[in-house]
Amino acid sequence: MILFCDTSALVKLYIAETHSEALLQSAREANLLAVGRIAWAEAFAALSRRAREVPADASAIDEAKRRLGAQWREYFVLEISQAVVELAGDYADTFALRGYDSVQLACARTLQLATPEPVRFACFDARLLKAARVLGMEVFPEVQAEARR
């Protein structure tokens, strides 16, 4: 199984939050961890925002950024090509997704179509999980995710 992490899932691999332990277990079981190229910027933005909002977490956030930077080369990184953004545009319309959510889904779908191995899509947005299910991907978490605020 290939585990594709959108940014909401990727951050949970580095910061202890609800579902982090189960997601870490899923990552250990995966043959490959995959992300879209944009996850780097989105993850660093999310982590930096948390450090600003919760100054007590700043040192933990710095460590999370360091670990993400060190482990990034271990991920299979999907590039954001013209074909991916065109597919993302279709998904934004079809599934009523936000721009970068549709890009994440298009990256995962591109991977799914390129390999016979099952792709599990990890994210924490209900609409995005539903779209991944419609496209035939396994999803994490199995239960309906809470809608992003």
Image (tube, helix red, strand yellow):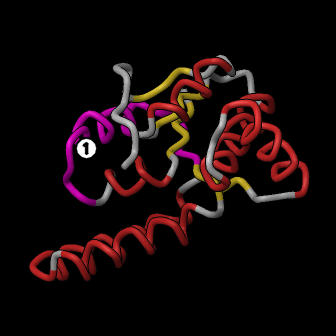
Taking depth in this image into account, of 105 and 68 the one nearest to the observer is 105
**Left or right side of 58 for 68:** right
What amino acid is labelled 1 in the image?
Ser
- Seen from the viewer's position, the closer of residues 24 and 58 is 58
What span is in magenta?
Answer: 15-34
Q: Residues within 10 Å of mark 1 (few under 14, many from 20)?
A: some
Residue at image point 20% right, 42% down: 18
In terms of depth relative to the viewer, which is nearer, 93 or 103?
A: 93
Query: Where on the picture, by quarter, is residue 69?
Result: bottom left
Residue 87 position, x and y percent, is 83, 42
User: Where does residue 73 sit, x and y in percent of width and height?
Assistant: 56, 65
Q: Is residue 61 left or right of residue 89?
A: left
Secondary-structure class at tag 1? helix
Question: Residue drawn 37% across and 32% down?
Answer: 26
Q: How many discs mark residues in the rendered view?
A: 1
Whole-percent x, y for residue 68 in the image? 41, 68
Q: The N terminus lies in which quarter of the figure?
A: top right
User: As displayed, is residue 138 above or below residue 99?
Assistant: above
Question: Residue 27 sits in which quadrant?
Answer: top left
- Let me know if residue 131 is in the magenta part: no
* Horizontal arrangement in the rendering, residue 108 relative to residue 19 (left or right): right
Q: Which residue is mark 1?
A: 20
Q: Quadrant of residue 44?
A: bottom left
Q: Residue furthest left?
A: 56
- Residue shown at 79% from the left, 28% from the top: 113
- Tell me if residue 141 comes above or below residue 4 in the rendering: above
Is 22 colored magenta in this rendering? yes
